[in-house]
Image (cartoon, rainbow, N blue to C red):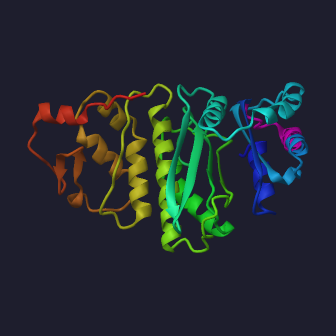
Amino acid sequence: MCAAPVTYCKDVLAKRDSVKAVLTNAGQANAATGAQGYADAVQCASTLASALGVTPDDVLIMSTGVIGRRLKMDNFIPAIPELLPTLGASADDAHRSAVAITTTDLVSKEAALRVTIGGVPVSVGGMCKGSGMIHPNMATMLGVVTTDAAVDTEVWRGMLRRATDASFNAITVDGDTSTNDTVIGLASGAAGAPRISDAASPDGQALEAAVTALLQGLAKAIAWDGEGATCLMEIAVSGAASDADARVVAKSVAGSSLAKAAIFGGDPNWGRIAAAAGYSGVQFDQNDLSVRLGDIPLMEAGQPLPFDNAVRQQAAGCPQNPD
């Protein structure tokens, strides 16, 4: 079930490789709004395109908010041209945009870094929103990543897809998903660095590593800011038969209410973690299973280790959100 702006973006990107603007609103998701909701998204894109002097297909749309409510078009359409004088390229401009798209978020999420491509400094920046309805894949989460690197379209799409899988598609807060999940990546080439046409090249690997690191930092910020969250759990799985199996086990543990309750309570109950791995559906020999909390081993080769409750309670203690 895709919201109207998601369907609109898919339709645009199915017929072209590039866009010039992204319009985002918070408040109404424009989901479950039927044909009129799609028409509203098209009108929003057309209005911004007219103000910018580009075509409607140069504009993508992202919406977040209450499902089942149309955009307030009487307010929305007249306000779009008024956005243009506020456009800017400073860190303050980016921060205002990151704040404007928040809903139940307690903090905005934004980051930027630089990487050298062919001897030329290249910037990679991103912002996102998300706090509730967060579960792979994504959930009520909107994200935009931009770079002034030059990248072939299919190479860039592959980079963004892999980086998203390693970040936004690897977090969960409440197990609920949404209708408006969107991550958009824009590569302008404005830095003047050599064009990347091979993701496996040194320049391609450098850019993908930067994009992945940026999105992982933003994804972790979403998890920290989860609705009602006071702890951050990071699950690492090694020794699985494949990356796909490792991901399934990690998601099973991350989604376990009992495992989360144990961490919140500082209770080193490794059995809840082991059980979640066991019911994940991945086949493994339980005699090969080991569990650690931080650097503290709790289970080794399918057997519990001697129990030092004080040390293990400390290991299980909930890391507090640094805000």
Image location of residue 81, percent across then percent down: 86, 34
Give the quarter of the figure containing the C terminus.
top left
Report the side of 315 relative to 165 (left or right).
Answer: left
Instruction: Find the magenta span and give its range.
Output: 28-45
Q: Nearer the viewer, residue 170 or 175?
A: 170
- For image coordinates 69% across by 58% down, the residue present is 188
Image location of residue 244, percent across then percent down: 44, 62
Report the side of 250 relative to 45 (left or right).
Answer: left
- In the image, residue 305 lies in the stretch drawn in magenta: no
Image location of residue 239, percent across then percent down: 29, 63
Q: Looking at the magenta stretch, what is its main secondary structure? A: helix
- For image coordinates 64% across by 44% down, the residue present is 181
Instruction: Give the tally of numbered discs.
Output: 0
Q: Is residue 206 visible?
A: yes
- In the image, residue 29 lies in the stretch drawn in magenta: yes
Q: Is residue 139 visible?
A: no
- For image coordinates 80% across by 56% down, the residue present is 11
Q: Nearer the viewer, residue 140 or 150?
A: 150
Report the side of 273 relative to 103 (left or right).
Answer: left
Q: Which image quadrant is residue 198 in? A: bottom right
Question: Relative to residue 316, is residue 2 depicted above or below?
Answer: below
